[in-house]
């Protein structure tokens, strides 16, 4: 036997001791489990980053978002429009240095197709405090089927460095429970 | 030892080439590392726990697809 | 210009004067980069600790850029260039293949480094380490990176040429040692990595001159072929250094050459797929691509690390048992030379790399779990455990052997050197775990003001996050003291240290 800094002499392609062999087998089985979990979660799990993905011209996405805002706007706060789209619809969110447009008001347990993109540079979508994160890339439309499973007042924090005003880039998502009154939602956070 | 400030691996180098007959038979070099076996299984246990705790954490968030 | 050889009185290895000089030069520049990156690290950390919030937003992002480039590129690659010369010329008793070209490459890398440092400090490249297009830096920045990368690529070629020279001139018998084999895999991965680097920085350089268009998603895909693969150079180099330190400190044996070498080959085969780890929640790729690539084709590169994670400590155990420490399960570990900074670095490097860095890395690199990890503090928590507590600590440990063997100097401030790995390891452990924990609450990485005091909407993180960020800063400061001791000890030893006695070991 030799150390790692000595040249092995002759043939070194020899069978390993059984302890070492067993460990390799155990490790390999674990690797297969790690691998299998991902397709399995696509079949059985409720959280997958698949989405409907397209290339899109940033200006065209901006225009589409503006159309969406015009159609469903119910108010305004801090210069950002608040929209209340019908359940099941396509909804749009755009990251622009350094804000998220618009503020979304959604129904609990309703599914939406949330299209996210950026007008300028990379941004990061972090839904606070749920801790759901997606990369927002200019030129790409990421259409995620989203079902809010709890009501509340949420924030969108930008978590991809996007310039000097990065830390100012906070948006808002409000989820209302249809079974309760919606009067307070949309007001002061 | 007069050499202050030199790692012991240089001052008194470990026997670098143990006699191969000490190391078990021709086919079975290796072996006799029961301490390491325990350590790697502790590692595997930690790995399995952390991995599945994270799947659990993921299952709490909104439905996304 | 072949230069002369000296015979190392300790190991009996013949050391080529050019190899000596190249190792020294690369190690010195690496240490300077470590110092710059370390100072930046402390400034960044004291800003993220909201109780102090030291820097302005502008200087925070600038320092973060400087920290990333100096640590992940300049420090670690200059050090790896030294490792390549050591693993080829020194371990194989050979001359360096083309010393003139080697020095040219070294100075090219230094030139690239100086250009990049200048652009960063002058505020012309506030784009962070990743420089995601369309964030724009001055063309000089990209040019500096390109020059550096060309230099590094040349050194890798010289490494391969030296292997050929050694074989042709029969400077060793049998096969190359495992450490050299591991370094060769690191070098092959370096070629893959630098190829990606050229494929992305050259177009980006042209883009910065308005000569072509670069797609933001394509940039991320190809850039991470550089960004993640370069960390896999570090892994392969670190594992080689593990085997090296095991051999130096306790005469660790190689259990089975076949298994260990095959594991290194797995790194080469599957590592370049790791770019996908960063694109799991990106809009550009579909689930099949993500699942297959993030798993390195069914986790075969993870398998390689799990194999080394067994064979390295088992080699240490067996080496110790063969030397008589054979009682019970753990006498080999209890009676190990814990006062030798080479050995303590080795053990802490293995433990923190595996238990913290490895486990978190594989977990966060899972397609769906990435949804609750991407761009939060969990990510830097993971890679500080791998690349700092793992790679950098292993490199620190091997320095305590390189200084007596190559620089022929005794280690200054020996008692400080002995505790240095402990401080650094404990500090980085606290730092990484705290960071990972804060990220679990969704705390963002690369963020100047987590209190959002000037933002349009109020964001109130759990008080636990504030507490954990304070713990993180304390861990980081302990590690910084360890890093400072390392720099003090190595610089003092090299420039003012007492020379090793000539002619035979003590």
Image: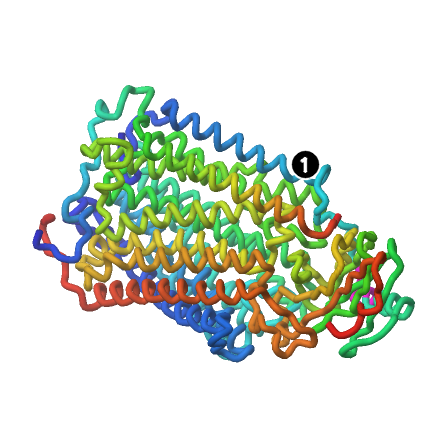
Q: Is residue C198 visible?
A: no
Q: Is residue C103 left or right of residue A162?
A: left
Q: Residue at x 49, y 63 (%)?
A: C468
Residue extending farthest right:
A71
Residue extending farthest front:
A180
Q: Is residue C479 left or right of residue C214?
A: left
State the quadrant of the N terminus of chain A: top left
Instruction: Please provide the residue range marked out in magenta.
Output: A56-61
In what element is the residue under mark 1? helix
State the quadrant of the C terminus of chain A: bottom right
Q: Residue at x 65, y 42 (%)?
A: C291
- Residue C241 lies, with reference to residue C175, above or below; the image says below
In the rendered image, residue C159, in percent from the top left (x then y), is placed at: 38, 49
Check the image and tell me how it is coloured: rainbow
Disc 1 crowd rating (10 Å Cα; few below 14, some 14-19, many 20+) is few
Residue C474 picture quarter: bottom left
Q: Residue at x 20, y 27 (%)?
A: B19
- Residue sitting nearer the eye, C497 or C436: C436
In the rendered image, residue C370, in percent from the top left (x then y), is placed at: 62, 50
Residue C278 within the magenta-colored segment of the rendering:
no
- Residue sitting nearer the eye, C9 or C253: C253
In the rendered image, residue C456, in percent from the top left (x then y), is placed at: 69, 76
Q: Chain of mark 1?
A: A
Q: Is residue C396 visible?
A: yes
Q: How many marks?
A: 1
Classified by dominant secondary structure, the portion drawn in magenta counts as: helix
User: What residue sits right under mark 1 in the picture?
Assistant: A40
In the rendered image, residue C350, in percent from the top left (x then y), is placed at: 38, 46
Q: Residue at x 19, y 40 (%)?
A: B14
């Amino acid at each position: 036997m030799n150390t790692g800094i000595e040249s092995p002499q002759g043939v070194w392609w020899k069978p390993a001791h059984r302890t070492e062999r067993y460990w390799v087998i155990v490790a390999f089985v674990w690797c297969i489990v790690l691998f299998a979990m991902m397709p399995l979660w696509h079949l059985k799990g409720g959280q997958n980053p698949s989405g409907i993905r397209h290339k899109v011209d940033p200006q065209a996405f901006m225009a589409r978002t503006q159309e969406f805002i015009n159609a469903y706007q119910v108010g305004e706060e801090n210069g950002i429009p608040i929209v209340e789209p019908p359940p099941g619809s396509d909804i749009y969110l755009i990251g622009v240095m350094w804000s998220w447009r618009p503020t979304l008001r959604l129904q609990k347990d309703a599914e939406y197709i949330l299209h996210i993109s950026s007008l300028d540079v990379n941004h990061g979508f972090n839904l606070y405090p749920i801790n759901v994160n997606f990369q927002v890339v200019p030129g790409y439309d990421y259409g995620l089927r989203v079902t809010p499973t709890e009501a509340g007042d949420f924030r969108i924090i930008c978590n991809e460095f996007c310039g000097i005003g990065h830390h100012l880039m906070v948006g808002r998502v409000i989820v209302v429970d249809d079974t309760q009154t919606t009067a307070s939602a949309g007001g002061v956070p | 030892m007069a050499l202050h400030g030199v790692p012991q691996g240089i001052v008194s180098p470990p026997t670098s080439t143990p006699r191969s007959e000490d190391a078990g038979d021709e086919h079975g070099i290796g072996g006799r590392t029961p301490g390491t076996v325990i350590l790697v299984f502790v590692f595997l246990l930690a790995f399995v726990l952390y991995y599945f705790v994270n799947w659990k954490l993921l299952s709490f968030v909104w439905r996304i697809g | 210009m072949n230069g002369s050889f000296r015979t190392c009185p300790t190991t009996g290895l013949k050391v080529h004067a050019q190899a000596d000089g190249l190792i020294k030069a690369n190690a010195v520049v690496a240490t300077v980069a470590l110092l710059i990156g370390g100072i930046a690290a402390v400034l960044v950390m004291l800003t993220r600790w909201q109780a102090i919030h030291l820097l302005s937003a502008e200087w925070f992002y600038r320092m973060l850029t400087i920290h990333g480039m100096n640590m992940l590129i300049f420090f670690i690659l200059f050090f790896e260039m030294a490792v390549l010369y050591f693993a080829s010329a020194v371990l194989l008793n050979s001359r360096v293949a083309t010393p003139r070209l080697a020095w040219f490459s070294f100075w090219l890398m230094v030139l690239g480094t100086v250009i990049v440092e200048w652009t960063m400090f002058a505020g012309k490249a506030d784009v962070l380490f990743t420089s995601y297009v369309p964030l724009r830096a001055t063309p000089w920045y990209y040019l500096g990176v390109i020059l550096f990368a060309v230099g590094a690529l040349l050194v890798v070629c010289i490494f391969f040429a030296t292997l050929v020279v050694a074989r042709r001139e029969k400077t060793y018998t049998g096969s190359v040692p495992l450490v050299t084999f591991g370094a060769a895999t690191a070098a092959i991965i370096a070629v893959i990595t630098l190829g990606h680097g050229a494929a992305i920085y050259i177009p980006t350089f042209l883009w910065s001159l308005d000569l072509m268009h670069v797609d933001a998603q394509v940039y991320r895909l190809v850039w991470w072929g550089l960004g993640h693969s370069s960390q896999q150079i570090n892994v392969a180099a670190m594992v080689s250094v593990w085997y090296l330190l095991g051999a130096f400190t306790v005469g660790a044996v190689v259990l089975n050459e076949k298994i260990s070498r095959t594991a290194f080959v797995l790194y080469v085969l599957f590592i370049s797929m790791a770019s996908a780890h960063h694109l799991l929640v990106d809009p550009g790729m579909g689930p099949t691509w993500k699942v297959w690539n993030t798993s390195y084709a069914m986790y075969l590169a993870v398998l390689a690390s799990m194999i080394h994670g067994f064979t390295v400590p088992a080699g240490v155990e067996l080496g110790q048992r063969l030397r008589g420490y054979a009682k019970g399960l753990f006498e080999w570990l209890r009676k190990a030379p814990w006062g030798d900074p080479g050995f303590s670095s080795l053990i802490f490097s293995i433990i923190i790399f595996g238990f913290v860095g490895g486990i978190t890395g594989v977990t966060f690199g899972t397609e769906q779990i990435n949804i609750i990890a991407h761009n939060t503090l969990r990510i830097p928590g993971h890679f500080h455990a791998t690349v700092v507590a793992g790679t950098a600590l292993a490199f620190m440990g091997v320095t305590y052997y390189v200084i007596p063997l190559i620089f022929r100097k005794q280690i200054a401030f020996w008692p400080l050197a002995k505790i240095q790995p402990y401080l650094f390891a404990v500090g980085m452990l606290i730092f990484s775990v705290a960071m990972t924990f804060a990220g679990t609450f969704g705390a963002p990485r690369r963020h100047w003001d987590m209190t959002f005091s000037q933002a349009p909407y109020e964001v109130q993180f759990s008080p636990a996050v504030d507490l954990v960020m304070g713990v993180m800063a304390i861990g980081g400061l302990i590690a910084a003291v360890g890093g400072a001791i390392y720099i003090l000890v190595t610089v003092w030893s090299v420039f003012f240290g007492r020379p090793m006695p000539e002619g035979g070991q003590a």
